[in-house]
Image (spheres, grey):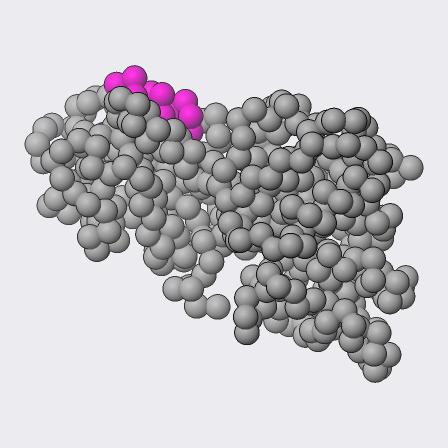
């Protein structure tokens, strides 16, 4: 996969934060070498977050996000600030920009937010050509500080180096989707229903990325629809190392795949790759505790137009109500929207989040834990509701103790 076409969910997200008119947009333009953000001496020029996907060596694919000033004023300004703070949920590294010799409660407040969200950050004193280097006594001595002039390009190379050095090592270690579950030379069977939501002429993103991960780990795969699975398995000389299916056809595939062949789903693979599988498994058992009129939140990363038999809006709610026999109240949020009133819900069910970076999923898990609300995942939920959870989680040793505790 070309780094120029790497999906945003697989890129490191670098957010640029600060007050209005400190040079955030100019700094972004200087970093990427292009006029991405509009630059003006008028405060508040940047109203909505501006994203630029690029390759930053030796890191690789990244997304820079320019944000509105946190000191914006008025009713509209308040909404801009809300959008800026929302960006923290998907920020892997934060750059706090201020002017030389200026350090206020706005900067201190941002640092508190970075630390609350556990975001590594660095501080940039911009417009250094207009003033002397500032006093740093109010900044943690372990925080990297860079002095720049975005207009004259002073300190830009130092800033790039600081970004590279501040990003934690874990971000350079690619998390496998399935590669650690197979050995070189292993065969994987992928069951891919072609439904109305699949893009015309293409597979959906999790399927494509799983194929790539298999190839990257020197395995190989066959891709079949559910109605061809039985024939495909019968024609194999040796059984596959694992079968991965779309969660929507779990019930059918479970009946076709012999017990000795491991079985899981794309969504469960992504529960681990993008989130925290242990938390999702713990959360799914709370379905047993639901009561009449309880509210359940369905969270989708995609913003696609829903179809008549949509997995999040139709199938999962129906399966959930059939399993529990309860009159549950279902809310659906899509894209980057996520409610602040989480305490109203008794359960959150999240999609595989192939369109999100891991930071955003982990932030949502953190918010749910803080609100005391269990969170689980589409694939984990569907396998639980179909009575095959133990089988679909068998490939993942890290959750065996949770399964045992529920027996």
Residue 105 falls inside the magenta stretch: yes
Residue 263 placement (x, y as % from top left)? 80, 60
Q: Is residue 355 visible?
A: yes
Residue 225 placement (x, y as % from top left)? 72, 71
| Magenta range | 104-114
* Residue in the foreground of this view, choosing between 291 and 383: 291
Predominant SS along the magenta part? helix
Residue 58 placement (x, y as % from top left)? 38, 57
* Residue in the foreground of this view, choosing between 377 and 325: 325
In the displayed structure, 227 sits above or below 82; it is below
Please identify the quarter of the rendering in which residue 260 is found: bottom right
Tell me if 26 is positioned left or right of 387 in this view.
Answer: left
In the displayed structure, 362 sits above or below 306; it is above
Residue at x-position 69% and y-position 66%: 193
Rendered-image quadrant of the C terminus: top right
Please identify the quarter of the rendering in which residue 103 is found: top left
**Tally of marks:** 0
Residue 50 placement (x, y as % from top left)? 31, 45
Q: Residue furthest front?
A: 308
Q: Residue furthest left?
A: 130
In the displayed structure, 31 sits above or below 227; it is above
Please identify the quarter of the rendering in which residue 6 is found: bottom left
Residue at x-position 87% and y-position 67%: 256
Residue at x-position 58% and y-position 49%: 353
């Amino acid at each position: 996969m070309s780094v120029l076409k790497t999906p945003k969910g697989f890129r490191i997200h670098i957010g640029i934060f600060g007050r209005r008119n400190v040079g955030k947009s100019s700094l972004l333009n200087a970093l990427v070498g292009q006029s991405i953000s509009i630059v003006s001496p008028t405060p508040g020029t940047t109203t909505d977050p501006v994203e630029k996907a690029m390759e930053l060596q030796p890191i690789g694919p990244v997304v820079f996000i320019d944000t509105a000033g946190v000191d914006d004023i008025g009713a509209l300004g308040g909404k801009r600030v809300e959008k800026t703070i929302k960006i923290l949920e998907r920020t892997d590294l934060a750059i706090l920009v201020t002017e030389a010799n200026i350090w206020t409660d706005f900067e201190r407040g941002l640092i508190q937010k970075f630390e609350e969200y556990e975001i590594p950050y660095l501080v940039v004193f911009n417009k250094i050509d207009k003033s002397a280097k500032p006093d740093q006594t109010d900044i943690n001595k372990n925080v990297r500080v860079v002095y720049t002039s975005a207009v004259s390009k002073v300190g830009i190379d130092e800033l790039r180096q600081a970004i590279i050095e501040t990003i934690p090592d874990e971000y350079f270690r690619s998390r496998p989707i399935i590669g650690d579950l197979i050995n070189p030379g292993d065969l994987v069977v992928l069951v891919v229903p072609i439904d109305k939501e699949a893009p015309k002429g293409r597979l959906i993103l999790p399927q494509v990325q799983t194929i790539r991960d298999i190839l990257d780990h020197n395995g190989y795969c066959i891709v079949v629809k559910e109605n061809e699975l039985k024939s495909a398995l019968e024609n194999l000389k040796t059984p596959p190392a694992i079968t991965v299916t779309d969660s929507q056809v779990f019930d059918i595939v479970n009946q076709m795949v012999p017990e000795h062949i491991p079985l899981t789903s794309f969504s469960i693979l992504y529960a681990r790759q993008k989130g925290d599988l242990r938390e999702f498994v713990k959360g799914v058992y709370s379905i047993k505790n639901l009561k009449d009129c309880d509210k359940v939140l369905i969270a989708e990363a995609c913003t696609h137009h829903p179809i008549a038999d949509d997995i999040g809006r139709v199938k999962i709610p129906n399966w959930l109500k059939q399993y529990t026999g309860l009159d549950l109240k279902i809310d659906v949020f899509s894209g980057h929207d996520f409610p602040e009133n989480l305490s109203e819900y008794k359960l959150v069910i999240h999609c595989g989040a192939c369109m999100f970076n891991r930071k955003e999923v982990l932030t949502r898990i953190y918010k749910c834990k803080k609100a005391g609300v269990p969170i689980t995942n589409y694939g984990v939920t569907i396998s639980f509701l179909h009575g095959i959870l133990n089988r679909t989680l068998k490939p993942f040793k890290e959750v065996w103790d949770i399964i045992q505790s529920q027996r």
